[in-house]
Image: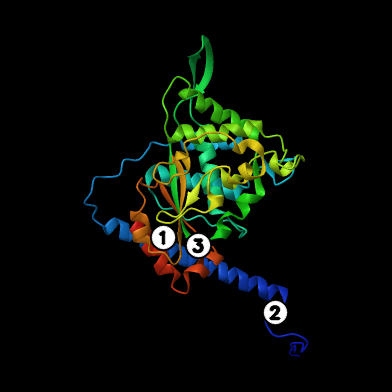
Amino acid sequence: MARHRPFDRAPGTDLRDRQLQRQAQLEKRAGLTSKLSVKVSRQAAETTVASTPVERIDRNVEGYMAALAVQPFHRLASLEVAELTPAYRRLVRSAAEVARDGSAQVVMPWPPTRISPSAIAALLAIGVVGSADVEQILIEGEWSNTRKRADELRAVVFPYARSTHALARSVQVDRHLLGEVHFEHLKRYLTGGADAAKDYHQVLARVRGLSGRAKDGMDYAEFEHPILDEIVPHGSPSGARPSNSSLLWRTRSKTDIATHKRSGEADHPAMAPYYLYTIRAGDRPGAELRAIQRAPDLLILDLSKSARDRLGWNWQKHAADMVATMR
């Protein structure tokens, strides 16, 4: 006897149907992303570059990842130490490899999850700075540990939106190790010299003095450590930078560490050694990229569902055009 479908629900709405539909959508997404990657790689191979070949830094990817692995993190306002998820470790490693050799990599976290592009840049910067070799210098007759100059890192994120920072603002970077590493870098300048890297290390070395005490005199766990989103400054290559885009923008506004002298060069897009250039879906990629005075090291192309929605129905073309323009 034939089975009849119950009349209390529409066809294709039970749990198994939804699982099959979700799997079909993921497979379709994977196929489209793979085709885009192949297309962009083919276009890059066919493009004749008439200028001088780009000189890339021989980046120590394993050193970056090892330095990042020992850096403690906390969920916002939590005292417990948190670890990076495998998805973020994979994304940061891929970003480091792309910055090293200029390759194109497609990373699809499973299960699908929200990813913060600004967090990728900040985490990579922590690994880059923390991986610099330790050496000793003589300061006032005493030998002290310092760090050799770290690799610089400038990234582009497209298509950018304010939600790019949401998850990075819910994670705190433990101040003890972060501040000590930057103080060791700062020691290089105690005998003279100044540049944008000095300004960067000078600002972040000050997190060692955080106690959680806010300007109102009360102690809060959410102010005991800086948040991940304020480790790397960001802004449009050609436009004004928002107030919450500079180094320690949140910590400076809520605690008393704001009162110190600095050059401000580490927040300037033309001089900053670590910077995230933001390009929105409606911007002209060519004009924005030409406004960047120091060549970026990598492009973070966000093809999550929300990012594809920002690009519109023709998102494949917009993404491919951005990659081709970047190259």
Residue found 51% across the figure and 9% down from its top: 141
Q: In this rendering, which labeled residue sits more in front, label 3 or label 2?
A: 3
Tell which of 54 and 87 is nearer to you.
54
CA distance for labels 3 and 1: 12 Å
Q: Residues within 10 Å of mark 1 (few under 14, many from 20)?
A: some
Q: Look at the image and tell me in which quarter the N terminus lies.
A: bottom right
Q: Is residue 208 left or right of residue 311?
A: right
Residue displayed at 67% across by 76% down: 17
Q: Which residue is mark 3?
A: 303
Circle 3: residue type: Leu
- Residue at the image position 58 percent from the left and 54 percent from the top: 165
Task: Tell me, yes or no, if residue 320 can be seen here.
Answer: yes
Which sits earlier in the primary sequence, circle 3 or circle 2?
A: 2
C-alpha span from label 1 to label 2: 34 Å
Q: Earlier in the sequence, mark 3 or mark 1?
A: 1
Quarter holding the C terminus?
Answer: bottom left
- Secondary structure, mark 2, is loop
The residue at which mark 1 appears reads as 37
Q: Amino acid at mark 1?
A: Ser
Residue 33: image x %, image y %? 46, 63
Q: Which mark is residue 13?
A: 2
Could you say where residue 172 lies in the image, as x and y percent from the top left?
65, 43
